[in-house]
Amino acid sequence: MELWYTEKHTDTVDFSIKVQEHLYTAKSPFQQIDFFKSEEFGVFFTLDGLMMVNEKDEFIYHDMITHVAMATNPEIKRVLVIGGGDGGTVRELTRYSTIEQIDMVEIDEMVVRACEKYLPITASQLNDKRVSLYFQDGLEFIHGKEGVYDLILVDSTDPIGPGEGLFSEAFYKDCFKALSEKGILVNQHESPYYPNYAKEMKRSHNKIKNIFPISKVYQFHMPTYPSGHWLFGFASKVLDPVEDFKPKQWEAFGLETKYYNTALHKASFALPTYVNEMLKA
């Protein structure tokens, strides 16, 4: 008998992976957590039946959520990660010796502990001395903070369940206040392709651009996410990710990356016409 994992991308489109082994299943107070092993993607991790991370393509997401901001402001010292329970975003941040503080706020401790066991490829640096873990609601954690962080990375799930509040106007306003003068916000921005995802993408962008003086969107190819075409939002008080981009300073870090590079940086902000039209609408 064959075991297959299937995720519904729309009511009429399915995405399936043949499973070799179901490694772990648990129900936390917040969501259903499962880990599977497959031939094509290695170990992969789902929440409420939706693909979050897998060993084969995780580097794409984690490169792009982290290095675009760091190449715009290489002087970032204090970072907040909201979500990101798999640890991949923190792993990339710890590669910068210049970063002094990394706070990670994840509502579901069970996710982090399971990833430490089954996905060490992403969770390997959570014990770095600069990393502080907070198992609480990100909305509550950030509320009331002012000028604390140079970079906030919102590594969230889709805007349903535990991740819903991380797409709210009140949350984005709190992020604005919590950022330093040259602070940057990068948020998981959904996909422009399927209508149900595009709706949330437009809602999120409209809220952010009404709060931040600079608000842009950049794209990347994520094979196991719906449609494969995914976006991040980039928002800042003063820094433009294209005009203020510092490729030579970033290259001086000497980091080896598998997806991000300085040529791709500018190119990722060159969006297809249909996406630009959505963002303007």
Image: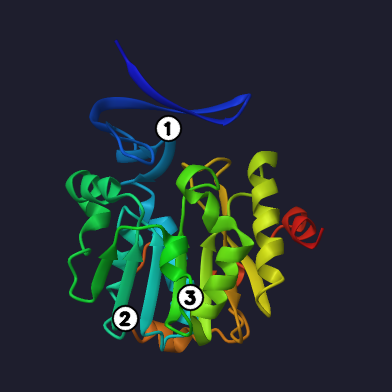
Identify the image quadrant of residue 29.
top left
Q: Which residue is mark 2?
A: 254
Can you see residue 121?
A: yes
Query: Which label belongs to residue 227?
Result: none
Relative vertical location of residue 173 with respect to residue 113 in this rendering, above or below: below
Mark whose residue sits in front, 2 or 1: 1
x and y percentages locating residue 236 in the rendered image = 59, 79
Mark whose residue sits in front, 3 or 1: 3
Relative vertical location of residue 118 with respect to residue 74 in this rendering, above or below: above
Q: Classify residue 121 as left or right of residue 174.
A: left
Q: Which residue is mark 3?
A: 144
Q: Quadrant of the N terminus?
A: top left
Between the C-alphas of marks 3 and 1, the distance is 34 Å
The amino acid on which the numbered mark 2 sits, given as a three-letter code, is Gly
Q: Classify residue 21 as left or right of residue 30.
A: left
Q: Residue at x 66, y 73 (%)?
A: 215
x and y percentages locating residue 81 in the rendered image = 39, 66
Relative vertical location of residue 253 with respect to residue 120 in this rendering, above or below: below
Identify the image quadrant of residue 234.
bottom right
- Crowding at mark 1 (Cα within 10 Å: few <14, some 14-19, many 20+): some
Q: Residue at x 46, y 54 (%)?
A: 156
Q: Classify residue 190 as left or right of residue 257.
A: right
- N-terminal of the pair, mark 2 or mark 1, is 1
Q: Quadrant of the C terminus?
A: bottom right
**Helix, strand, or loop for circle 3?**
loop
- Crowding at mark 3 (Cα within 10 Å: few <14, some 14-19, many 20+): few
Query: Which label belongs to residue 49?
Result: 1
**Helix, strand, or loop for circle 1?**
loop
The amino acid on which the numbered mark 3 sits, given as a three-letter code, is Gly
Can you see residue 260?
A: no
x and y percentages locating residue 95 in the rendered image = 28, 74
